[in-house]
Amino acid sequence: MSKITCIIIEDEPLAVKVLSGYIAQVAFLDLQGAFKDAIFATEYLRDNSVQLIFLDIHLPRLKGMDFLKSLTHPPAVIVTTAYHQYAVEGFNLDVTDYLLKPFAFERFLKAVNKVKPPQQAVPSKPEIPTPEKDFIFVMVQKKKVKILFSEIAYIESQREYIKIVTLQKEFTTKMSTHEIGSILPAHQFKRIHRSFIVAIHKIESYTSEIVEIQGVAIPIGREYRDVVEGL
């Protein structure tokens, strides 16, 4: 269980002794120090952080409420005082609780139970990479046909349809080369012509004008020659 670090700001030795004794009985509280002056506490907080302050109102040099107002990001504060007239001001400053001296341990425990313990970082689960899809389903003669990317040699546009040529057979489906191009893995397929997309690893040879796949000469569009040269 995470402990709540705390300090006491109190100028009465007896009150410090009582508070220290109460804190020692609560397993989730960890007393970091006691200060008889708010100025000393301010100096401590410049280099140290705590989750809870037990704060007296009447202190030398800097009063408790003035000290509290000086904090930019105050932790939880439990006011401990013999003066009830500061209660409204305390709650306006969002104090966690207001304990009137003398207070019993049960009342002290009720106050500290209002303080939320520091949140422990929950270790994030390692992300499991999603396996890359290696196939596509296309509509061929009113049924969905599965085609592996590794089997595709090239794709040819035929107006509103495309012809997908694989190592074994050909499939014709109603789709544009733009649509199929957005699905195919870019590192495996390249468009080399307005009407042709080819599988890079199926290219057997090429010139500045054509690529050859499975003995078929496929034209290279003028605007796509840089694509082929970069293979």
Image (cartoon, grey):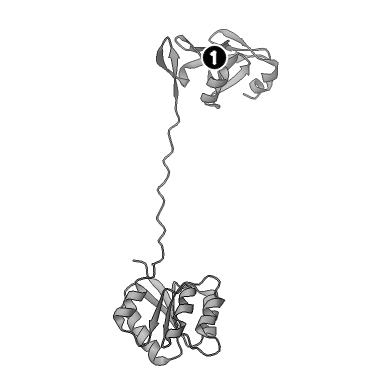
Please report the residue visible at 40 percent of the width from the left and 87 percent of the height from the top.
16
Give neighbour class at mark 1: few <14, some 14-19, many 20+ (Cα, 10 Å): many
* Rendering coords of residue 113 (x, y %): 34, 71
Q: Quadrant of residue 55 in the image? A: bottom left
Name the image quarter holding residue 96.
bottom left
Q: On screen, 101 above or below 205?
A: below
Q: Please report the residue visible at 55 percent of the width from the left and 26 percent of the height from the top.
A: 186
* Residue 9 visible in the picture: no
| Depth check, front residue: 200 or 110 | 110
The residue under the point 38% across, 84% down is 100
Q: Is residue 31 above or below residue 193?
A: below
Residue holding disc 1: 155
Residue 88 point in image, percent of width and height: 46, 78
User: Where is the N terminus found, in terms of image quarters?
Assistant: bottom left
Residue 47 position within the rendered picture, expressed as x and y whole percent measured from the top left: 54, 75
Residue flagged by tag 1: what amino acid is it?
Ile
Nearer-the-camera pick, 204 or 99 = 99
Please state, as top left, top right, bottom left or bottom right, where the C terminus lies in the image: top right
Q: How many marks?
A: 1
For residue 75, side relative to residue 70 (left or right): left
Q: Is residue 222 above or below residue 67?
A: above
Q: Secondary structure at mark 1?
A: strand
Q: Could you say which is closer to the camera, residue 38 or residue 28?
A: 38
Q: Where does residue 200 sit, x and y in percent of width and height?
A: 56, 20
Q: Is residue 205 visible?
A: yes
Q: Is residue 52 above or below residue 16?
A: above
Question: What is the residue that sits farthest to the right in this orientation?
Answer: 222
Asked if residue 164 lies left or right of residue 27, the reply is right
